[in-house]
Image: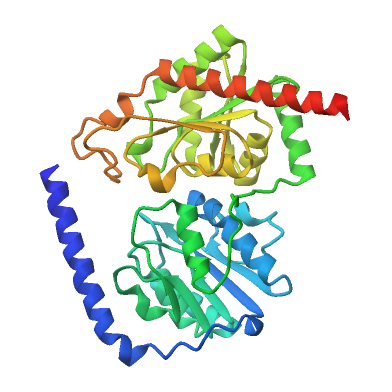
C-alpha cells in the first residue's frame, strides 16, 4: 500500500506539472473561443475510444445531442470492439471506427492509426467535436484539437483545457452521468433530469435470441437470471467458484432458470464454467457482442461484477445485482432504479487498481454467496411485484 501511495504521489506531481506547462502554452496555441452558436452546428463527432461501460454510459449525451440538433449528422468515433453497441442506436448517424487497444481509461493507437484518424477527422470538417473522457489522458483531446473543428468540447483535467474551445471542470466526486451533464452544460445543452442510458435491440435480434434460448432448453416464458462473471481487471472479479455456488442455490432452492453469458473475449472463462457446472446451468460463450446484448435482454435479472456488461444490462432497462470492490461507487454505480450493489467499505477500497496492491483481494472475497443470494431474492421479488402491478393495470384498462 505504501508503494501505491508513492506511485499516486508521483502521478499527481506529474499531472500538476503537466497542467502548469499546458496552461503556460495556452495563450500561444489556443485560439480565442468564439461564443457558442448552436445555429452553426451541422456536423458533430463524439470521440469515445475506451471500453464498453464508458460507451454505454455516454448514450444519454448522444441522445441529448440528437434531440438538440435533430437534422445534424452525429458521428461516433470508437474502437471496432465496442462499435456494435451503437449499431442500433437511432441517435447515431455514422460510425468511424479504429482498431485500437483498450488501455486503462483510454485507447492506445499505434502511430499509423493515430495519424490516419487525425487526417480523417480534419477532412470531415466537423462543426462540433466532443471528447467526453473525464480523465488525464491526452489522446482523445489531441484528436479533437487536430480536427480543427469550430467548437471543441471536453474536460479541463490536468491541462487538457488547451485543446478545447469550450471546457467543463472535472472537480468533485460525481457520477459518470453527472459528469456528462456538466460537460453538456458548457455549451448550453441540458440533459433530462431522469436521463439514463437506453440501449436498443432490434426485433430480429430479440427473436433470434429467444429461439436460441429455447434451443438450449430454457423457457423464455419463465424467469431467467443471467450471470456475467467476467471483469476487465482481475481485481473486479468475484471468485468464479462463488458464481457457480450462487447459480446452484438459485436453481436448487428457488427453481429459477440460470444462464451464464460471455463474449468472445471471455470464451475461456465461460467454457471453464461450462465444464465445472455440467448440465446444471445453461452456458453461452463465444458470443458476438450484439448476440450477447440480445440474449441479456431476454433475462429478468442480470448478476454481474462491476464491468461493461453491467452497464449494458442497465441500459437495457434490466434490474441488476452486482459486486463492487476496487471501483469508485460514486462514479460507477449503475444508473437508474432497480439496481442492488453488494460491496464492503474496507479501508483500502476503492483503490482503483487492476491488481490488489495488498495481494489479498479482500474487498471482493469478503462478499459472500449468501449476500448475493439474498440480493437476487430481493430483486426477483421486486420483479414479481412489478409484473403483478402491470397485469392489474391491464385488467383494469
Q: Nearer the viewer, residue 266 or 167?
A: 167
Name the spot of residue 259 as percent of width and height, x first: 59, 24
Q: Quadrant of residue 70?
A: bottom right
Left or right of 138: which side holds 387? right
Residue at (51% x, 13% y) in the render: 248
Seen as rendered, the residue at the extreme front is 396
Residue at (37% x, 63% y) in the render: 170
In the depicted structure, whether residue 8 falls above or below residue 35: above
Left or right of 154: which side holds 75? right
Left or right of 260: which side holds 360? left
Q: Nearer the viewer, residue 225 or 191?
A: 191
Residue at (57% x, 33% y) in the render: 338
Name the spot of residue 166 as percent of width and height, x first: 45, 78
Name the spot of residue 195 as percent of width and height, x first: 60, 52
Q: Which quarter of the rendered picture does the N terminus lie within?
A: top left
In the depicted structure, whether residue 175 falls above or below residue 358: below
Name the spot of residue 260 as percent of width and height, x first: 55, 27
Residue 33 visible in the snapshot: yes
Amino acid at each position: 500500500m505504501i508503494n501505491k501511495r508513492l506511485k499516486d504521489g508521483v502521478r499527481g506531481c506529474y499531472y500538476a506539472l503537466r497542467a502548469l506547462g499546458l496552461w503556460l502554452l495556452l495563450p500561444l496555441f489556443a485560439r480565442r473561443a468564439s461564443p457558442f452558436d448552436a445555429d452553426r452546428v451541422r456536423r458533430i463527432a463524439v470521440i469515445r475510444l475506451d471500453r464498453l461501460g464508458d460507451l454505454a454510459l455516454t448514450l444519454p449525451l448522444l441522445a441529448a445531442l440528437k434531440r438538440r440538433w435533430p437534422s445534424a449528422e452525429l458521428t461516433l468515433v470508437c474502437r471496432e470492439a465496442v462499435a456494435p453497441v451503437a449499431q442500433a442506436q437511432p441517435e447515431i448517424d455514422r460510425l468511424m471506427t479504429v482498431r485500437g487497444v483498450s488501455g486503462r481509461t483510454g485507447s492506445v493507437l499505434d502511430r499509423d492509426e493515430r495519424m490516419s484518424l487525425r487526417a480523417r477527422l480534419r477532412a470531415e470538417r466537423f462543426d462540433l467535436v466532443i471528447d467526453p473522457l473525464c480523465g488525464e489522458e491526452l489522446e482523445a483531446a489531441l484528436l479533437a484539437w487536430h480536427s480543427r473543428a469550430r467548437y471543441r468540447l471536453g474536460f479541463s483535467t490536468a491541462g487538457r483545457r488547451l485543446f478545447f474551445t469550450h471546457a467543463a471542470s472535472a472537480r468533485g466526486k460525481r457520477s459518470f452521468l453527472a459528469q456528462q451533464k456538466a460537460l453538456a452544460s458548457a455549451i448550453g445543452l441540458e440533459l433530462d433530469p431522469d436521463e439514463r442510458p437506453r440501449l436498443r435491440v432490434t426485433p430480429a435480434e430479440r427473436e433470434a435470441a429467444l429461439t436460441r434460448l429455447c434451443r438450449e432448453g430454457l423457457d423464455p416464458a419463465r424467469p431467467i437470471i443471467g450471470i456475467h462473471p467476467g471483469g476487465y481487471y482481475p481485481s473486479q472479479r468475484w471468485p468464479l467458484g462463488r458464481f457457480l455456488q450462487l447459480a446452484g442455490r438459485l436453481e436448487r432452492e428457488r427453481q429459477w432458470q440460470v444462464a451464464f453469458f460471455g463474449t468472445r473475449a471471455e470464451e475461456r472463462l465461460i467454457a471453464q464454467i461450462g465444464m465445472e457446472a455440467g448440465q446444471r446451468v445453461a452456458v453461452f460463450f463465444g458470443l458476438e457482442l450484439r448476440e450477447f446484448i440480445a440474449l441479456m435482454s431476454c433475462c429478468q435479472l442480470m448478476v454481474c461484477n462491476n464491468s461493461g456488461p453491467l452497464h449494458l444490462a442497465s441500459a437495457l432497462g434490466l434490474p441488476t445485482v452486482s459486486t463492487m470492490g476496487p471501483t469508485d461507487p460514486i462514479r460507477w454505480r449503475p444508473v437508474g432504479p432497480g439496481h442492488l450493489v453488494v460491496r464492503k467499505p474496507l479501508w483500502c477500497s476503492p483503490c482503483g487498481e487492476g491488481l490488489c496492491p495488498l495481494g489479498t483481494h479482500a474487498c471482493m472475497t469478503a462478499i459472500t454467496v449468501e449476500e448475493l443470494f439474498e440480493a437476487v431474492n430481493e430483486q426477483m421479488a421486486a420483479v414479481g411485484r412489478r409484473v403483478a402491478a402491470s397485469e392489474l393495470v391491464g385488467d383494469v384498462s
